[in-house]
Amino acid sequence: MNKLASFNYDLNDYIMSGELSKVASLIRGLSKEAQSIDVPNFDEVQDRPESDFALITYHPKQGGIKKYAKWNKELTELSIAFLENNITDLPDEIVKVASTNLCTAANEYGLEAPKLLKEASTSEAYIDPTVDLTQVDDYAFMQKIATKETPTEYALPEESKYPIETPRQIDEAQHYFDKFAHDFYPPQAVTYAKRVKEACLKNNIEVKSSLLQKFASLDTSSQNEDFSLFIESRKSYLNKDQKEDRELYDDLVKTAETLSPSKLALLTEKVDKTTGLDRFWGNGVENPALASFAKEAEMKGTGPSLEQLKGLSNADLTAVVGNEAIKDLKGPEGVQVYHTLPSPIKKEIDTLLL
């Protein structure tokens, strides 16, 4: 049971072992109060009574070690997140005790305990938090680890990367995309976004990332009809003496019709990196995927209905078309007005409708 004695159970364990990136990923998405609470240090933990913890791991060589603090709402929320993350890697004896005590605490604080913890809970009241590690069924634990299922749903399935099977994984995938979308190859970014959005819909999870929404609406089999406009926009960021860089973009436009959408996106990415404009992606310059790929068919055709246009926020529309056009867009001829707008502006409105 040496592994269990040194296992990283809760927030304090991960901090003490220096796994701060793991801590950041696990607390992301929790309440602001839980994210900002002062974490008790080792001495503070030792001074607290055992009843303030959901689990006490006992080993003859270590004595009792307190895990999963629960003496206030914020610490309970944090402890629940870490137990949920580790629940498939722990023996049932530990899972049942920690889950029971954290579910009971969650109920007292008005928190919603995750399904996995509820299923493992054995009582609606607190139970003895101590688990003797020498009494854990080694064989049963080994069987559990051996039969542990590996993820089958990934944001990038061909690479078996970025699992999206649990609500926490899906939320983490959304946050990751917001931060690193421009690090993916253009076709990869679209696949990732579509897969995560599908997982959100399947699990009844809100799609919080507007950037992910934009990429998920792209069709990698169709070229963006306004590609040349996006290239002209790029050229406006170049200095007058960057003649060769301008020629690179001009050549890209000339050959665009002969290239597949994915090839065009990859070449645009390459040129952007050559000219240094990749540093402006998402900040004035559209990512090559958004410039090269067309919107899915559902966003084309007849366009939005008058009801959809009327439902848009005036504040959002002002940023796209200005104050004067809002009345016309929401008036009786709103749909016709929409179709008279330039394609880039229509695309911005389409994005608001997602």
Image (cartoon, rainbow, N blue to C red):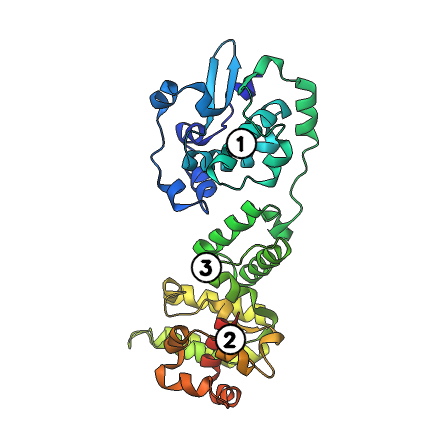
**C-alpha distance separating marks 3 and 2:** 22 Å
Residue behind mark 3:
182
Please name the residue that numbered disc 2 is placed on.
Answer: 350
Give the residue type that dot 2 points to.
Answer: Asp
Do the CB atoms of the residues marked 1 and 2 lie less than 8 Å apart?
no
Amino acid type of the residue tagged 3 in the rendering: His
Q: Position of residue 174 (x, y in %)?
A: 51, 54
Question: Which of pointers 3 and 1 lies earlier in the amino acid sequence?
Answer: 1
Labels in figure, total: 3
Residue at (54, 57) in percent of width and height: 206
Residue 162 horizontal/vertical position (percent)? 56, 48
Closer to the chain start, of discs 3 and 2, is 3
Element class at badge 1: helix
Q: Is residue 134 left or right of residue 11?
A: right
In this rendering, does residue 246 appear at all? no
| The quadrant where residue 48 appears | top left
Please report the residue visible at 35 percent of the width from the left and 26 percent of the height from the top. 41
Image quadrant where one finds the N terminus: top right
* In the rendered image, the vertical position of residue 326 relative to residue 9, given as above or below: below
Residue type of the residue flagged with mark 1: Thr
